[in-house]
Image (tube, coloured by chain):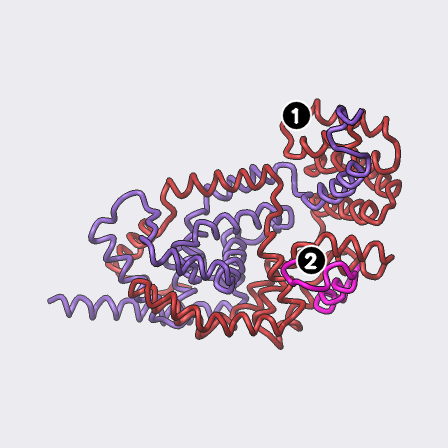
Chain colours: A red, B purple
């Protein structure tokens, strides 16, 4: 398709616009530094976002409330703002990007089983669609665990503790994951439709180990981790595997083995972001 | 006796262990995810910045929001499917983060405060007049355009995405993208022509 090109003048203006509308180099450095710090300290990415999104999924009523209040807040903020961007804000609030939302979520969740369900959830409430796409990791775990033992449900609760806190009430009741599951239910089996990449396969193994570990089945976790070590000795997630192994060993009561695995880990990966955590595992008194 | 037990009584240790045991796999991202994220950041930070601004994130919030986008990238880089366009993927994430920012109460309040104060300038250089004008013109144009057309126009004409990439990212038909693009281009040219007339 040969679309009519834009005029020279139009292209020039757009080029200028693009060069000016960017992160300055100082801001760039600031963001990168902050990013590194957060990654290194293991600050849960998405902590806040996920928390509020999760709570939104769980209670649609709340969403409306927030939006209602926003309708008041936005114009207020905007009157102070400079002229052009102000128009921007109003427009956007008036039409909250409904049409594009459904499919936009698709690429992000493409590798996941839930994607088939996405359009259904979108029908009733556009805002939720944005939420569901972003919450994909946590609820997935919640979904697979609720059907298991109550202890698993509890661990799911713990994992999304941030979310529950934001929600206020119901935090420790093991019932809460259900609220999430309502949205996320259909599949439990972690079997993506897309051909799994090696990384996906690795991820799945580690996820299984995680579930086993979280429900107190350390020896299961260890054998899954051993499986991972066999299949992907130098996999991309080898480091995470070793961390998990040290902890699982310790939890299963194999203190000696845990300590030597720990020391080996620290010796070979002194700069690992997990180093400090690993160091505390099965610490000598 | 208690001196050589930094953690206090053993129960404390047990609890720590329990907590620790739940965490590492939560962060089970590829070992080189941090490096990947930095590469992506270097290549696309500006793109994300603009996407967030276009989605209505204020100048006061946009740095935080950029960081948040790349934290999501860090988390999900293992899930990213290679065949797609990375920018389309980033755009999707940016949109979600922007939505979050627009709805967040605390941030909203903080933003209001920030707006009362000196507006934050992130750019290094003072924009030359013709650049400042270009910014004003394009922002005004995009603001006056319907959201659908504005998004397509921005992604194609400003960011240089291909129409198929945009179609995939927005989940709309390719012809729809071309249609919106054509209309937006026409309008842009019209607006420029009118401006030129006024200046004479």
Q: Left of B180 or right of it: where is A178? A: right
Q: Chain of mark 1?
A: A
- How far apart, in angstroms, are the residues tagged by discs 1 and 2? 34 Å
Query: In the depicted view, which residue is nearer to us: A106 or B59?
Result: B59
Label 2 crowd (10 A; few <14 / some 14-19 / many >=20): some
Q: Chain of mark 2?
A: A
Q: Which residue is mark 2?
A: A112
- Image quarter in which the N terminus of chain B is found: top right
Q: Is residue A172 magenta?
A: yes
Q: Which residue is mark 1?
A: A270
Query: In the depicted view, which residue is nearer to us: A70 or B186?
Result: A70
Task: Give the residue displayed 36% in from the left and 44% down from the top.
Answer: A24
Task: Give the residue displayed 68% in from the left and 37% down from the top.
Answer: A236
Secondary structure beneath label 2: loop
Highlighted magenta segment, given as a residue range: A164-188
Q: Are marks 1 and 2 in contact (CB under 8 Å)?
A: no
- Quarter holding residue A253: top right
Q: Left of B188 or right of it: where is B98? A: right
Query: In the depicted view, which residue is nearer to us: A266 or A5?
Result: A266
């Amino acid at each position: 398709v040969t679309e009519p090109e834009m005029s020279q003048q139009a292209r020039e203006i757009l080029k200028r616009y693009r060069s000016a509308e960017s992160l300055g180099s100082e801001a760039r450095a600031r963001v990168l530094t902050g990013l590194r710090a957060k990654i290194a300290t293991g600050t849960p990415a998405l902590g806040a976002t996920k928390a509020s999104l999760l709570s939104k999924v769980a209670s649609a009523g709340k969403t409306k409330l927030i939006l209602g209040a926003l309708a008041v807040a936005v114009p207020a903020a905007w009157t102070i703002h400079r002229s052009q961007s102000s128009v921007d804000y109003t427009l956007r609030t008036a039409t909250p990007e409904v049409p594009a939302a459904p499919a936009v979520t698709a690429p992000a969740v493409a590798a996941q089983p839930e994607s088939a369900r996405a359009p259904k959830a979108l029908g009733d409430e556009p805002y939720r669609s944005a939420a569901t796409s972003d919450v994909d990791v946590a609820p997935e775990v919640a979904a697979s665990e609720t059907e298991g033992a109550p202890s698993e449900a509890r661990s799911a609760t713990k994992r999304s503790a941030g979310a529950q806190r934001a929600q206020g009430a119901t935090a420790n009741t093991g019932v809460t994951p259900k609220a999430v599951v309502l949205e996320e239910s259909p599949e439990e089996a972690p079997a993506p439709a897309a051909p799994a990449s090696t990384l996906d396969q690795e991820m799945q193994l580690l996820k299984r180990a995680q579930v086993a570990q979280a429900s107190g089945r350390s020896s299961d976790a260890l054998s899954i981790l051993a499986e991972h070590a066999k299949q992907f000795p130098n996999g991309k997630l080898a480091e995470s595997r070793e961390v998990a192994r040290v902890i699982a060993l310790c939890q299963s009561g194999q203190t000696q083995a845990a300590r030597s695995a720990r020391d080996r880990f620290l010796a070979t990966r002194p700069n690992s972001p997990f180093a400090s955590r690993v160091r505390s595992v099965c610490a000598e008194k | 006796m208690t001196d050589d037990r930094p953690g206090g009584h053993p129960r404390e240790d047990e609890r720590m262990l329990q907590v620790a045991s739940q965490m590492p796999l939560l962060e089970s991202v590829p070992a080189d995810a941090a490096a990947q994220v930095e590469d992506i950041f270097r290549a696309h930070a500006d793109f994300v910045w603009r996407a967030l601004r276009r989605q209505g994130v204020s100048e006061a919030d946009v740095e935080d929001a950029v960081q948040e986008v790349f934290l999501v990238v860090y988390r999900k880089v293992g899930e990213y499917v290679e065949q797609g366009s990375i920018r389309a993927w980033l755009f999707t994430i940016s949109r979600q983060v922007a939505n979050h920012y627009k709805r967040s109460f605390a941030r909203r309040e903080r933003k209001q405060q920030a707006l009362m104060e000196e507006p934050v300038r992130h750019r290094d250089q003072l924009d030359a007049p013709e650049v400042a004008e270009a910014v004003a013109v394009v922002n005004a144009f995009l603001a006056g355009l319907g959201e659908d057309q504005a998004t397509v126009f921005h992604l194609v004409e400003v960011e240089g995405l291909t129409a198929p990439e945009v179609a995939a990212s927005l989940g709309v038909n390719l012809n729809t993208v071309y249609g919106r693009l054509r209309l937006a281009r026409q309008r842009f040219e019209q607006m420029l022509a009118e401006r030129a007339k006024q200046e004479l």
